[in-house]
Amino acid sequence: MTNTPANWPKDHPAVAHGKIGVLLLNLGTPDGTDYWSMRRYLKQFLSDKRVIEEPTWKWWPILNLIILTKRPGPKGRDYQTIWNTEKDEGPLKTITRGQANALQERFERQPEVIVDWAMRYANPSTESRIDALFKQGCDRILLMPLYPQYAAATSATACDDAFKALMKMRWQPSVRVAPAYHDEPAYIKAIAKSVRYGLANLDFEPEKIIATFHGMPQKYFDKGDPYHCHCQKTSRLVREKLGIEPDKWLTTFQSRFGNDPWLQPYTDKTVERLAKDGIKKLALVAPGFSADCLETLEELDGENREIFEEHGGEHFAYLPALNDSKEGIDVIEAVVRRELMGWIS
């Protein structure tokens, strides 16, 4: 609503208030696939001290003199293979927008709830969307990081970005943060249903199924990050929900870079080993991704497919993320409604 409380001066400007904002937060995607768009995106992403926990004196020359010189071109070409040319944007942006629109429809009977979305890196920025929600009268905002498993490099940095925006506001809204939902029953049920549907629509039966999660440096885990434990629990719960025997289901980690050891076993090395060991039929699922993106569409369905086939594999499938499917929105709605208790009836 937009009005002025009765006890305020009559000449006080109208103030929008009484609304509740839900802000979906995801990682981000470059504004384009050209060199400079990719460079801006990589610079923002890889300058985040939550992502790269290295001393500035050590990381700055590596980032600015090597990575930001050599990587924008090849990464831009990788993004071109999955780019949504119709909307001229990355699929992560398309899907996250779709998730926000679908969630808004779920609150049709509660018009006081306004759903929006933002990216930690690139656009639309978290600060711009918090400002937009506040201007629409949202004096209470729920931050919903779309990361089922908590990690400092994802969940925490998304919240850091939101808190930085709040620091600039004279009149801050009340804020809640939805926790990780790695063992949320609605999430486990949705992933299992999606996997079951995906397997039923294959023209082959996989000999092995890999649940692959985004990796992180081993030293982050050693410092106390719960991400590895969250991933392992998610994987176990989904396998049990599907009734799949442990020897058919593997849990691995992908997307590593640099020379430091990362969480193991590595997805690409596991795919290669299975093919060399005579496995001919393989399926991959990525429960940690709420939306398909470069790491799933290009890395899993592209690079790992090639690795498998080059070493003797014959039938390969990547089972899509929940994205903005009904099951995917069911999960987000379940978490959001739970966290809005006391704010909405």
Image (spheres, rainbow, N blue to C red):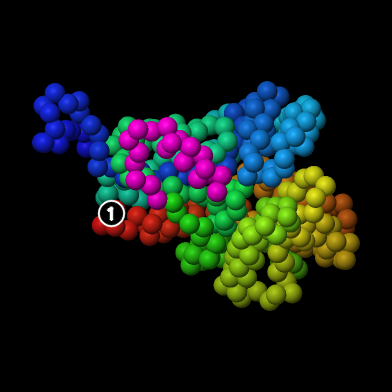
What residue is drawn where x is 44% and y is 51%?
177
Q: Picture quarter containing residue 11?
A: top left
Compared with 271, 53 (above or below) is above
Compared with 89, 284 (above or below) is below
Q: Residue 13 in the image: state x and y as whole percent.
A: 20, 25
What residue is drawn where x is 56% and y is 44%?
157
Q: Residue 186 in the image: state x and y as whole percent.
A: 47, 64
- Element marked by disc 1: loop
The reply to whether residue 14 is visible in this rendering is: yes
Q: Residue 265 in the image: state x and y as whole percent.
A: 77, 61
Q: Residue 174 in the image: state x and y as whole percent.
A: 34, 45
Tell me if 17 is positioned left or right of 264 in this view.
left
Tell me if 26 is positioned left or right of 279 in this view.
left
Range covered by the magenta-colored residues = 156-176
What residue is drawn where x is 63% and y is 44%?
50
Q: Picture quarter containing residue 203?
A: bottom right
How many numbered marks appear?
Answer: 1
Is residue 259 covered in magenta?
A: no
Camera-side residue of 333 and 60: 60
What residue is drawn where x is 26% and y is 57%?
345
Tell me if 54 is positioned left or right of 135 in this view.
right
The reply to whether residue 284 is visible in this rendering is: no
> Label 1: few (<14), some or many (≥20) within 10 Å?
few
Name the residue beneath numbered marker 1: 344
Quadrant containing the N terminus is top left
Amino acid carrying mark 1 in the image: Ile
Is residue 171 covered in magenta?
A: yes
